[in-house]
Image: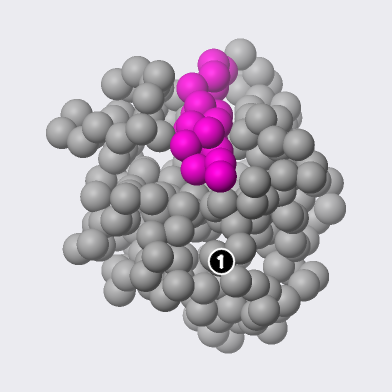
Amino acid sequence: MKPFLLLQHRYLDEASDNEYEAVLDYGNLQPNEIVRIRMDQQSIADINPLDYSGIITGGGPANISDSEDEKSDVQKRFEYELADLYPTIFEHDIPYLGMCYGMGSITRYLGGEVGKEKYSEPVGAVTITKNQKEKDPLLDGIPETFTALAGHKESCQQLPDKATLLASSEHCPVQMIRCKNNIYATQFHPELDVAGITLRIKAYKNHGYFDPEKANELIDSLQEVDVNYPPVILRNFVERFKT
């Protein structure tokens, strides 16, 4: 089969490795079935999306809506290179799953608005509600409402014209979208479990997502959260598009 491609931009090794391991685990993938590229360290300018069964992009501290003056040269590079892949992805409807950062990236490409004005969510558990008017194979086996882990400063301010809304939360109306038949993005994290969120809270303690003095309290509050359903999205994506 053609491998999947995982594009990451977490510059903290521990967080990046944890994200990679979660994608392997919840996607039921072996290391030889996925190509991992850390965009914070490596260019993707020569990537051909047609070489892969599907493409998964991870989240991280970068924000699409930051001003150009606030962005590092590395962020400017991988944002440009990732956006340069989208014409091929959309032309061929190549399977794509963007997680958190991927929502902003796809929204921006579609001409939508990404910003911090509304709909940000603090790090923690959120209740996701499926759009009952839309049935989608990536949500097979998932109830109408389920708990997921999220934490984002920016969000899609309005659903892009070419996107179909698949799921929402109370404070963030655009939590999951589909474009064409095979292109997806989530604002929440399908790959994230309690161990993963604990690691990320420690790793990003001083990145402005929460009061650093309350990090341990936040970790304790999440230890019993049931997040068994979001990884099903990742597994369904891989099973559906494995070629």
Verify whether residue 226 appears in magenta: yes
At 32% from the left and 50% from the top, the residue drawn is: 181
Q: Position of residue 178 (x, y in %)?
A: 33, 49
Q: How many marks?
A: 1
For the residue pair 19 and 208, the one nearer the viewer reads as 19
**Which element carries disc 1, helix, strand or loop?**
helix
At 68% from the left and 58% from the top, the residue drawn is: 8
For the residue pair 161 and 209, the one nearer the viewer reads as 161
* Residue found at the far left of this picture: 133
Q: Can residue 65 be seen by looking at this rendering?
A: no
At 56% from the left and 41% from the top, the residue drawn is: 242
Looking at the figure, which quarter contains the C terminus? Answer: top right
Verify whether residue 15 appears in magenta: no
Q: Which amino acid type corresponds to the residue marked 1 in the rendered image? A: Pro
Q: Position of residue 82 (x, y in %)?
A: 56, 72
Pointer 1 residue = 49
Q: Is residue 124 left or right of residue 176?
A: right
Q: Which residues are magenta?
A: 225-243
Residue 79, quarter of picture:
bottom right
Q: Can residue 110 be seen by looking at this rendering?
A: yes
Q: Is residue 185 left or right of residue 222?
A: left
At 60% from the left and 57% from the top, the residue drawn is: 52
Q: Position of residue 26 (x, y in %)?
A: 63, 30
In the displayed structure, 160 sits above or below 44; it is above
Q: Position of residue 137 (x, y in %)?
A: 36, 32
